[in-house]
Every structure is written in C-alpha cells, then in structure tokens.
Amino acid sequence: MNAEQRDAEFLAELLEALPSLVAFVDRDERTRYVNRAVRVWIGREPEDCVGMTLREFLGDDAYALVRDHVAAASAGRRQSFRRATVLPGGEVVHALTEYVPRWREGRPDGFTVLVTDVTGQERAELALAEDQLLVRELRSRSRTAATLTDDVLQELFAISLHLERLRRFPEEAWTVADKAIGSLSGTIETLRSTVKHLVADVERRPPEPGGGRDG
C-alpha cells in the first residue's frame, strides 16, 4: 500500500467515525457516498443508500422541506440551515445541515452533505435569550421603581417643609395644615400607583413552565 492509499484509508476511517452524517450527492441528485452515521440519522444501512436519489434517501416530506436548498447547492451556492428532525428512534433533535458544492472545471458538480446535531447549542442559545430578556425586564422595573420612588420622596420632602413651617409659624396652622394634608394625599396616591404598577408588571410576565429549565 502506497502513501496515497494509506491517506485515503485514513480519511475514510475518520469519516466513518464521525457522529455527523456525511454524504455526497452527484449532479443527478443521487447519493454516491454516506458514512455509518446514516444508521442513526436515517435508519438505513450505508450500502443500501448508495445510488438512491435524494428524494428516495430522505423521503417525500423531508425532501420537500429542503428542495430549494438542494437546487441552490446544485447551482453552486453553499447552503446552511437548521431545523428540528425526528430520528428513527423517535428522538427530536435540532440539526445543522450544510450543503457544500463541489466544483469541477469551473462548474458545480454535486455537493457534500454534512448534518450535525446542535441540540445542546440550541438549548444554550435559548437559555441565553431568556436570561437577556429577564435582565431587560429587571432593568425596566428598576427604572420604573426608581422614578416612582423619587416622586414619593419629593412628596415627603414637601410635607416636611410644610410641617417645619407649621412648627415655626403656628399662627398659620390652618393654611399650612391644609397644604400638608394635600401633599400627604398626593403621596398616598403616588405610593398606591407605584404598588399597582409593579404588581401589574409581575402579573404580565408568564410563569416559567415546570418552575424552571431542564438541564
């Protein structure tokens, strides 16, 4: 066995060991190679898949979903897309599918298929998006609470000024008391509005399903 044959054998061993589905589809949309991962992804034996059309390989429904991507790859445009996939065992996974065109003499000549399970990445991205949404909600509530709290403090400060004037000028008791009572009523209304606003904000947020995330 020469060096070129050894390299080819080594590459074949690498492809067969990959958990990702690797296949090559020719210009007539026929499968010319699939690795052993096809057993997990499609539920077929590799040798049974060689020579199948892509429609036969995937099935009518699955082929209809990727038809446009197949046409684009056959025309020489690399494709990359994600979608949920049901494995033969019933497990639902998120798959990243890539079609990489092969070029011969300046023309597209089939394409390589690479399908990778990215379920863990999808879950991590969803968790990150949920965390970012929560942070934005908390910041919004903090700003609202800070604004309303500032309004209340201003009302209380006004009341304290009225009370101080009452202490210093008791002869103006009725006039000052009336203003103090007015300010106190305004403060109570502001506090009531603050509580209603925060309670409504909490009620608008839907509860987390199951009380939390799955691991």
Image (tube, grey):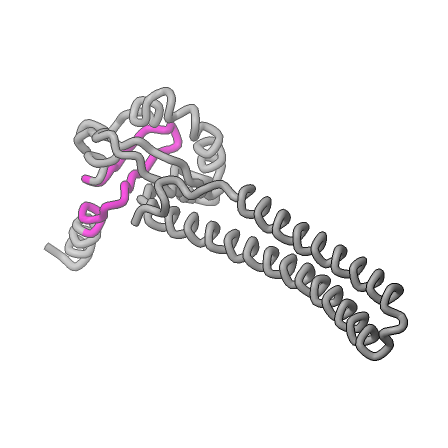
Report the residue at 27% width, 41% height from top.
21
Residue 34: give x, y in percent of width and height. Answer: 24, 37
Residue 73 in the figure: left or right of residue 59: right
118 versus 71 height, above or below: below
Residue 52: give x, y in percent of width and height. Answer: 28, 25
Q: Is residue 168 visible?
A: yes
Q: Which of 203 and 118 is in front in this view?
A: 203
Q: Name the residue furthest front.
A: 171
Q: Nearer the viewer, residue 208 or 7?
A: 208
208 versus 184 height, above or below: above
Residue 154 in the figure: left or right of residue 139: right
Residue 173 in the figure: left or right of residue 124: right
Residue 117: give x, y in percent of width and height. Answer: 31, 44
Q: Name the residue furthest left.
A: 1
Residue 79 among magenta residues: no
Q: Nearer the viewer, residue 76 or 136?
A: 136
Residue 91 found in image quarter: top left
Report the residue at 26% width, 32% height from top.
87
Residue 146 in the figure: left or right of residue 109: right
Q: Which of 171 and 70 is in front in this view?
A: 171
Q: Is residue 112 visible?
A: no
Give the extent of the magenta segment.
14-36
Q: Name the residue furthest top.
A: 60
Residue 183: give x, y in percent of width and height. Answer: 78, 61
Residue 88 found in image quarter: top left
Quarter placement of the N terminus: bottom left
Residue 16 among magenta residues: yes
39 versus 78 height, above or below: above
Report the residue at 70% width, 67% height from top.
153
Report the residue at 23% width, 46% height from top.
19
- What is the count of numbered marks? 0
